[in-house]
Image (spheres, helix red, strand yellow):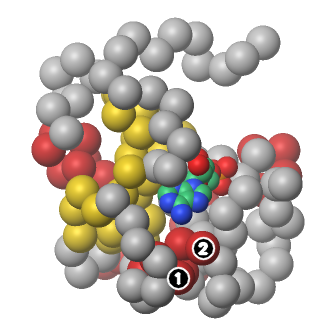
Amino acid sequence: MPIDAKLPYDEGNIFARILRGEIPCKKVYEDDFALAFHDIAPQAPTHVLVIPKGPYVSWDDFSAQAPDALIAGFVRAVGHVARDQGLDVPGYRLLANMGQDGGQEVPHFHVHLFGGRPLGPMLAR
Ligand code: AMP
């Protein structure tokens, strides 16, 4: 069920619980700014989620409210994970769903990293 991304941050959302270590994840990378882990329902041979370490609901919230150092650290972490997964040469796709029309379901900002095969058209028609 897509979320209303203008709601206040919910400390009980599933990714907040993963960040606090209350729920396990298949971690692929962590630093001061970001945590990356395998999506539980992968839609490509590689499907990793990268989340910032901070209470941001969505891209809208993160881009407007996060400090510059966190934004920079998060972007670098996404690039690092993609290279670490061996996706930089064949290429990959990044996706951030935002709000209801974007189809966002988890109200903690995250970027999907897809790769491992040609990914086809950008959007389903
Ligand atoms: P979105 O629609 O962009 O909010 O995507 C949420 C993603 O989180 C989906 O691809 C889910 O499969 C994934 N997901 C939900 N719960 C978990 C979990 N516990 N561990 C890993 N991925 C999850």
x and y percent of residue 22 in the render?
Answer: 46, 86
Residue at figure coordinates x 82%, y 62% from the top left = 3
x and y percent of residue 92 in the render?
Answer: 35, 27
Q: Is residue 105 left or right of residue 61?
A: right
Q: What residue is disc 1 on?
A: 17
Residue at figure coordinates x 54%, y 43% from the top left = 41
x and y percent of residue 8 in the render?
Answer: 76, 85
**Which corner quadrant of the image does residue 122 belong to?**
top right
C-alpha distance separating marks 1 and 2? 5 Å
45 is higher (above) or lower (below) than 63: above
The residue lying toward the viewer, choosing from 7 and 117, is 117
Quick check: can you spot residue 22?
yes
The reply to whether discs 1 and 2 touch (Cβ–Cβ < 8 Å) is yes
Q: Which mark is residue 74?
A: none
Q: Is residue 51 left or right of residue 96?
A: left
Q: What residue is disc 2 on?
A: 14
Q: Amino acid at mark 1?
A: Arg
x and y percent of residue 73 in the render?
Answer: 27, 69
Quadrant containing the C terminus is top right
The local crowd at label 2, few if under 14, some if 14 to 19, many if 20 or more residues have their Cα within 10 Å, is some
Q: Quadrant of ligand 1?
A: bottom right
Q: Is residue 97 left or right of residue 67?
A: right
